[in-house]
Image (spheres, helix red, strand yellow):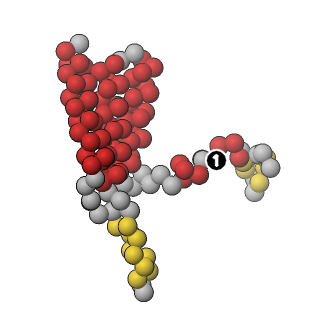
Amino acid sequence: MAGGWRDGRLEDDTMDFPSWLKKFDLARWWQAAIVVSLVTLLAALAAGQNGFAMIGLAGVLCGFGKWMNHRKEMEIRPSGTLTTYERANRTQGLVLVGLGVVLGLIGLYRVIAS
């Protein structure tokens, strides 16, 4: 059913999140940083603000780098499942974080200099 009334309220199935977006856990700060930085990037590009766009892109890169360095690990125990996000540095994650820091500093310089 593509929408309609159910239990006294209007439902619209076209607003369902894609399956990959449902798995996006905003309780992890690096994933929340990706979302905020992506919104900043898109808004800055729409407004033609290159310095702020670079800062937004830097946040996205740093967020993905941190995400790569904090893999989800699950352990089954008799009392339940233990989920942790241990930090394990990976080359790709460190490169993304490094690129993000450099782009963020360049973007900050461009914003201050303009």
Question: Residue 28: x and y, percent?
Answer: 36, 54
Quadrant of res 72? bottom left
Decide: is 36 above or below 30: above
Q: Is residue 29 visible?
A: no
Give the camera-side residue of 93 and 50.
93
Instruction: Using a 10 Å C-alpha cutoff, classify the residue at mark 1 as few (fewer than 14 neighbours), some (14 to 19) or many (20 or more).
Output: few
- Identify the residue shown where x is 36% and y is 38%: 60
Write down the residue under mark 1. 16
Quadrant of res 36? top left
Decide: is 70 above or below 108: below
Question: Residue 58: x and y, percent?
Answer: 30, 34
At numbered mark 1, what does the secondary structure look like: helix, strand or loop?
Answer: loop
- Identify the residue shown where x is 35% and y is 59%: 71
Question: Residue 1: x and y, percent?
Answer: 80, 49
Q: In this view, which residue lies farthest toward the front?
A: 91
- Identify the residue shown where x is 42% and y is 17%: 47
Residue 53 in the figure: left or right of residue 102: right
